[in-house]
């Protein structure tokens, strides 16, 4: 009998910390505070469809939101509104691009950042023009006697940065 009690006590000591460490389910939209609902309002219609990990990320953003400067808050709201307009496939692609960018060496990241800034300094009309030109598929090998290609228009930002025009700028907020 004493052995059984010791075994039970030992089992409880081992299993309770594991049960306590299990992540709890994120709250439903109705369970959020009014402040959280206001901050996360763009996500409201899709909240119940979000994965628990995504809900936790957004709740973390909502927790930090009151401490942000007004311009940072406005940026978060703009990005959140843009994010909810994306399809699940586009969101996944944005996450994958973000992860890919995070793995780049610092010098390559700096180069891309510089190119992105240069692109953003272009007049709006020029950016639209660059954004509206469809990407060309990889060209097949051409015959040797083909005429020379015309000079291309100013280069668009590289694929890594150009891809983010249609979705929020990658940031840890989205991961």
Image: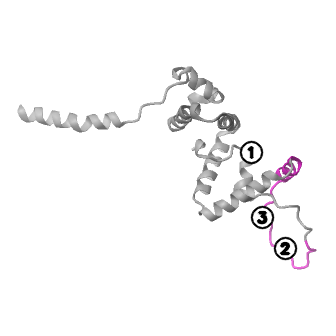
Q: Mark 1–mark 2 contact, CB under 8 Å?
A: no
Label 2 to label 3: alpha-carbon separation: 12 Å
Residue in front for this viewpoint, 60 or 68: 68
- Give how far apart the Cα atoms at labels 1 and 2 are: 33 Å
Q: Secondary structure at mark 3?
A: loop
Vertical comparison of 89 with 141: above or below: above
Residue 88 vertical placement versus 138 (above, below): above
Q: Which residue reaches farthest bottom?
A: 144
Task: Give the image's coloring scheme.
Answer: one colour
Say whether residue 10 is left or right of residue 87: left
- Residue behind mark 3: 138
Question: Which residue is denoted by mark 2 in the rendering?
Answer: 142
Nearer mark to the viewer, of 3 and 1: 1
**Residue at the image point whose x is 65% and y is 38% from the top:** 72
Q: Which residue is mark 1?
A: 166
**Residue extent of the magenta highlight:** 124-148
| Closest to the observer, 171 or 56 | 171
Give the quadrant of the N terminus: top left
- Where does residue 117 sit, x and y in percent of width and height? 75, 54
Query: Measured from the top left, where is residue 99 in percent x and y?
Result: 58, 53
Instruction: Answer whether labels 3 and 1 touch (C-beta < 8 Å).
Output: no
Binning the other alpha carbons within 10 Å of mark 2 as few (below 14), some (14 to 19) or many (20 upward) gives few
Name which residue lies at 32% across and 34% down.
19
Does residue 134 belong to the magenta stretch? Answer: yes
Residue 174 percent coordinates (x, y): 60, 42
Mark 1 / mark 2, whichever is N-terminal = 2
Q: Image quadrant for the C terminus?
A: top right
Magenta stretch: dominant SS? Answer: loop
Instruction: Say left or right for 92 vs 129.
Output: left
N-terminal-most mark, 3 or 1: 3
Residue drawn 75% across and 47% down? 165
Q: Does the magenta run of residues contain 17?
A: no
């Amino acid at each position: 009998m004493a052995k059984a009690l010791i075994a039970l006590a030992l089992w409880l000591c081992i299993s309770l910390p594991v049960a306590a460490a299990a992540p709890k389910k994120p709250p439903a939209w109705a369970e959020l505070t009014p402040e959280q609902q206001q901050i996360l309002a763009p996500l409201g219609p899709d909240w119940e469809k979000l994965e628990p990990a995504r809900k936790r990320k957004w709740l973390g953003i909502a927790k930090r939101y009151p401490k942000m400067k007004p311009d940072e808050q406005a940026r978060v709201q703009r990005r959140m509104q843009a994010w909810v307009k994306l399809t699940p496939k586009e969101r996944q692609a944005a996450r994958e691009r973000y992860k890919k960018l995070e793995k780049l060496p610092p010098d390559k990241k700096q180069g891309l950042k510089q190119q992105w800034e240069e692109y953003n300094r272009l007049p709006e009309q020029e950016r639209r023009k660059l954004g509206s030109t469809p990407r060309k598929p990889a060209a097949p090998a051409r015959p040797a006697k083909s005429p020379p290609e015309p000079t291309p228009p100013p280069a668009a930002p590289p694929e890594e940065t150009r891809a983010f025009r249609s979705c929020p700028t990658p940031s840890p907020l989205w991961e």
